[in-house]
């Protein structure tokens, strides 16, 4: 098999995994982030307002760089507390593209925040919004002789409303997050034959982390993320970051995923991360994923860049750094 054919083969498989789904092949359809611990608004609406300031984040991810049709994701989130920090509101805008599939959408979030201790808050969150889903299936060549597969005979254009919910428990040293960002199983196409179907899968996320001081200038922050996609086995991310002088953080993660119910658990990627608190208000983050799956020969790396800017107001002030 030539290298050129291998690239086309993997690009086509990627389209199937991310865009179609089936009774036999089930996969995570939602956006993937390596810096999830710094981008929780994209996973859990209950996170809104938890940083006690107006917080704005932008993130761009180029996954499997070099692979034609590989996913590219851009997100913007903003959130802030209201009513003496008893309420949090936020917004999330995103665009996610993989091959001939593209989804662009926006969600508004609302969190009701309850003090359950001197420094501990329980937040209950809801989000609602819609996305524009486009699939240019007619551009996909499914056979060398030009024969047309019925499932790729026409393009798809849909508006997909959705809503989600979450719980977020946190203080200045630890957090626990449980969320289901999209609960409606929208149909992505009208093509359904036997066990094959094309719908948005419900997905759930469980995340947790804490920070502990090792020395006066070094802090350790472990975290983990468990990902569930309806009908698929669990995915798991384990991460550890070390903060130095509350300004620079170096970290590493391991991601283990199962893209189908019949495959074995494999390490999808190992990740290196750098976070820099440039000022009290501005933070920069970068993540480098080294591919460990079968895509390694054609797409050995992924890259993710994040920037965050925060504004204090009223009696609030920026704390450096905000660990969660």
Image (tube, helix red, strand yellow):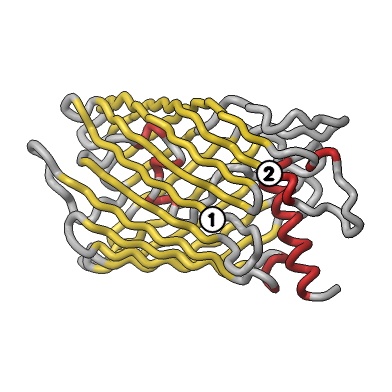
Residue 90 placement (x, y as % from top left): 32, 34
Based on the displayed image, in which of its 4 quarters is residue 89 positioned?
top left
Disc 2 element: helix
Nearer to the camera, 157 or 170: 157
Q: Is residue 133 left or right of residue 282?
A: right
Nearer to the camera, 45 or 170: 45
Q: Which residue lies under the disc numbered 1?
A: 72
Picture residue at 52% right of the left edge, 39% below the top? 205
Q: Is residue 48 left or right of residue 119?
A: right
Disc 1 element: strand
Picture residue at 35% right of the left edge, 35% below the top? 91
Picture residue at 72% right of the left edge, 66% below the top? 294
Circle on res. 19:
2
Residue 240 placement (x, y as % from top left): 43, 61
Based on the displayed image, in which of its 4 quarters is residue 102 positioned?
top right
Picture residue at 18% right of the left edge, 61% below the top? 279
Q: Is residue 84 above or below residue 57?
A: above
Crowding at dot 2, Cα within 10 Å, few <14 / some 14-19 / many 20+, comes out as many
């Amino acid at each position: 098999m030539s290298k050129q054919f291998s690239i086309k083969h993997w690009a086509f498989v990627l389209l199937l995994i991310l865009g179609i789904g089936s009774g036999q092949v089930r996969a995570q359809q939602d956006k993937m982030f390596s810096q999830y611990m710094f981008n929780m608004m994209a996973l859990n609406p209950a996170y809104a307002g938890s940083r006690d300031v107006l917080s704005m984040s932008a993130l761009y991810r180029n996954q499997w760089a070099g692979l034609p049709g590989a996913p590219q994701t851009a997100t913007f989130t903003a959130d802030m507390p209201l009513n003496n920090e008893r309420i949090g509101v936020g917004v999330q805008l995103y665009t996610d593209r993989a091959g001939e599939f593209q989804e662009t959408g926006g969600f508004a979030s609302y969190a009701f925040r309850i003090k359950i201790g001197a420094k501990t808050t329980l937040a209950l969150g809801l989000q609602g919004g819609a996305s524009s889903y486009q699939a240019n299936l007619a551009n996909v060549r499914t056979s060398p002789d030009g024969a047309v597969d019925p499932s790729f005979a026409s393009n798809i254009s849909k508006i997909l409303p959705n809503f989600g919910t979450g719980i977020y428990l946190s203080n200045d040293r630890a957090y626990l997050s449980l969320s289901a960002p999209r609960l409606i199983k929208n149909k992505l196409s009208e093509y359904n034959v036997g066990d094959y179907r094309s719908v948005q899968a419900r997905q759930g996320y469980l995340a947790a982390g804490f920070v502990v001081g090792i020395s006066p200038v070094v802090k350790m922050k472990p975290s983990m993320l468990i990902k569930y996609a309806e009908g698929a086995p669990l995915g798991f991310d384990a991460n550890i970051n070390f903060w130095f002088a509350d300004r620079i953080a170096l970290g590493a993660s391991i991601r283990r995923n199962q893209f189908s119910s019949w495959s074995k658990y494999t390490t999808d990627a190992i990740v290196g991360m750098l976070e820099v608190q440039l000022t009290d208000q501005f933070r920069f983050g970068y993540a480098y994923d080294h591919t460990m799956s079968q895509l390694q020969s054609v797409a050995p790396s992924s890259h993710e860049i994040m920037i965050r800017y925060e504004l204090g107001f009223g009696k609030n002030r920026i704390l450096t750094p905000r660990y969660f």
